[in-house]
Every structure is written in C-alpha cells, then in structure tokens.
Amino acid sequence: MEIKIYQGASEIGGTITGISCGKTRILIDFGRPLTGDDRKDRLHIKDPYDAVIFTHYHRDHTDLLPYAAEKIPTYMGKTAKALFLAEQRHKDPDGEIIRRIEKMKEYEDGVAFDVGELRITPLLTDHSAFDSYMLLIEGDGRRVLHTGDFRLHGIKGDLVLPALLPLENTVDVMIMEGTNLSFADPVTVSEYHLTDAAGLLMQRFPYVFVQCGAMDIDRLAAFHMASRGRRFCCDPYQMSVLETVRKSGQARKYPAYSFDRARVWMTGSIVSSDEIEKQPFCTAVRVGSDFRRIIEPYAKALPEKTLFIYSMSEGYLRGHLGDVQKLTKGLRYAVKIHTSGHASAEALRLAAETVRPAALIPVHTKQGKNFDLQLPDVRILHLADGESFQV
Ligand SMILES: [Zn+2]
Ligand SMILES: [Zn+2]
C-alpha cells in the first residue's frame, strides 16, 4: 500500500490524499485550500485513479469536483450528498458541479464497499459539516485510517471515540487533520454549552435573529434548542435543508436534529411584509442575502427587544464584516457566539491515543510540527505535497 499527499499536506483544507494498492488508486477529497488561491491550474494529478471518495461536502474538500476525471466514480455520504446538492442548486442552478453531484454514489455509516483491491469502511464522525465521515481503507493486509475533518465537541461528539476503539492497535497509518494546531487559542467549547449561552441571552429578548451558514447544521441545532418554546423561523431553502436532516437516521439518535419547531415564516424570496410579529421568535438569517428587510422593522421600532447573534469563524468574519454591519444596522444588541468545527489539541490526542496507530501523518494544518509536541509517543511522518510513503 502507498500513501501520497498530492496537495494540502501543510495547509488548512485542500488536502488530496492518494491511497494505492496493486493496480488500484483512490483519492480522498478533491478541494482547494482555504487560503483563497485559485490553484486549480497548479493541480496536476498525473497518476491514474479509480475513484474519489469525499469525507464531507465542505468546499475545501469538494470544489475541484468538476475537474475530476469524468469517467471515474465518486462517493459521498447519503445525506451529505443530498445537502451538497441542495446547496449548489440554491447557489447556481445551472452549475456544472450539479451534474457531477447527481452522479455521485452514496455510502453509509459502517457499510464497507470495494474499489478494486481496496476496501473502504466509512465511520460517521462529528464535524461542522453534517454527515461527515472518517474512512478506514484496507488492502494487502494493511490498514489506513483517514480522519477527514472531525471534532469531539459537536452534537455527535460522543460517537467518535467509541467508533475508533475497535481499531485500537490495528491501524498502520492514521492520516489526521490538525487544523486547530495552527492557531494559538482556538475556541472549542461544546455545542451544548453554546446552546446554554445562547439560551440565557435569548431569555431577555422576545425577538431573536441568529446568523450562521445554511449548512452549519450543528449550530442551527444549537440555536433551535436554545430557542426553547419559540417558533424557529427560516426561509424555504433553509427549511428544505432542515427537513433533509430531520429525515436522516441521525435525527432518530440525536433529538437535537429534530427541528420540530422550525417553520417557514418568510415566503417568496424574502419576508412577505414588514409588519412586526408580536409572538417571540428565533429566526435564522444568513449573510449575502437580503435578510435586512425582515430585521429592519425591529431595528427601527424595537431595538431594545431585539437580539442578533452571529456565528462564524474569525477568518470568515473578516471577509464578511461589512455584511454583518449591514444586517445589524440600528440594532442595539449584536453578539458573536461561535465554536470551532475542528478538534481541539486535546481531542486530537484522545483520538490518536484511542487508535494507537503505528504511524501518523498530519494533514489539513499549517503546523504539522505541533503534532510532535502533542503526541510524543507516536511516530509522526511529515510528508510534503507530492511525497509518498510505503505502508
Ligand atoms: Zn476542511
Ligand atoms: Zn470540513
């Protein structure tokens, strides 16, 4: 078996991992780093490959999909594919990427499938993208575990280590994301603590607007839980996303994904009138869309009774500060509440100590060297882009 990191060995996002065995090669994820470079022209994968397996739908893992070889099969988790399709149809109904997503094969938690000489077993994990997976790859008597992006402090944080425990001492190489080792002080509080904090804030305000990404399902679940007895309002696109989540098997195990008070309040492209709604509510809004029109009446007439909670990473916020300022103009109370979509240093250590791999390759981080400090007892292999390792 051979592991080759084609791209993103020492960057956040854009990691493309090749795993080959005999005549078979698969690629795991096919996106661009989050640095903003348009690097599609610089990516040349000359090695032939037999499949691309996506761990989840985030753009830094998927946005090169239209450049993947047309004839080879691509795979994604069943619900992740449905959400990814909904997102792209909303953004650009005629986009080339839609045809490619429609063709994707679907996989499910714990159900192994074969690509040539490789067997792939997806393991559902916890991440800010819904229906994200770690991938166990087996071939030629060897085992590689690719963590994709993960964390332990989300809604499903409790399932990660128990899913890894059966792999203890059986994995030759663990390829692990290390996003938060790139930052001095990442915020990694649990989504349940974030729920408590948002709930306390909401108590004082009858009218609450919450801003986060339409696909940031855990954060929406946290805001929905925090809003307790109120109606949870959103636009038709957001509602269709929540319904997809509600229908997934994960909603049966995690009631946080039931979204039972979610309703479409806004009709058409945006709200039907500028009347003030008197019942307390929590309404999900987004940047980059014309949600200002539903906030404006409250900013003008009821600024003392209206709360705006915005939730995005520091990097994203830097790029959208103007959008947030537009949405919150005239409001007196705007609060940022956020937690990382990625594992804390402690969580990375726990995952590695649970699996006890013979070796570990850091990816999806700017500071792979920090793994040596975090995991002094693990053999860490630092691969550069284009470098390979024989398992
Ligand atoms: Zn990522
Ligand atoms: Zn991700």
Image: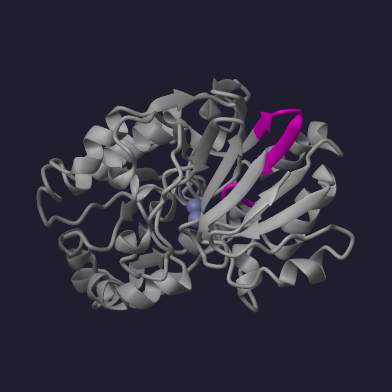
Of 369 and 278, nearer the camera is 369
In the picture, measured across the screen, residue 293 lies left or right of residue 231, that is left
Q: Residue furthest right?
A: 377
Q: Quadrant of residue 318?
A: bottom left
In the picture, measured across the screen, residue 40 lies left or right of residue 191, that is left
Expressed as whole percent of the image width and height from the top left, the position of residue 257 reads 50, 36
Does the magenta run of residues contain 144? yes
Does the magenta run of residues contain 72? no
Q: How is the image coloured?
A: one colour
Expressed as whole percent of the image width and height from the top left, the position of residue 176 reads 66, 53
The C terminus, quarter of image? top right
Q: Using the image, determine if residue 160 lies above or below residue 207.
A: above
Number of residue marks: 0
Q: Using the image, determine if residue 222 lies above or below residue 82.
A: below
Expressed as whole percent of the image width and height from the top left, the position of residue 268 reads 11, 43
| Residue occupying the point 21% across, 48% down | 91
Expressed as whole percent of the image width and height from the top left, the position of residue 96 reads 19, 42
Could you tell me if residue 260 is visible in this image? no
| Residue occupying the point 45% across, 32% down | 50
Could you tell me if residue 386 is visible in this image? yes
| Residue occupying the point 79% across, 51% down | 359
| Residue occupying the point 51% across, 65% down | 12
The N terminus, quarter of image? top right
Q: Quadrant of residue 5?
A: bottom right
- Residues shaded magenta: 137-154
Of 40 and 348, nearer the camera is 40
Of 29 and 256, nearer the camera is 29
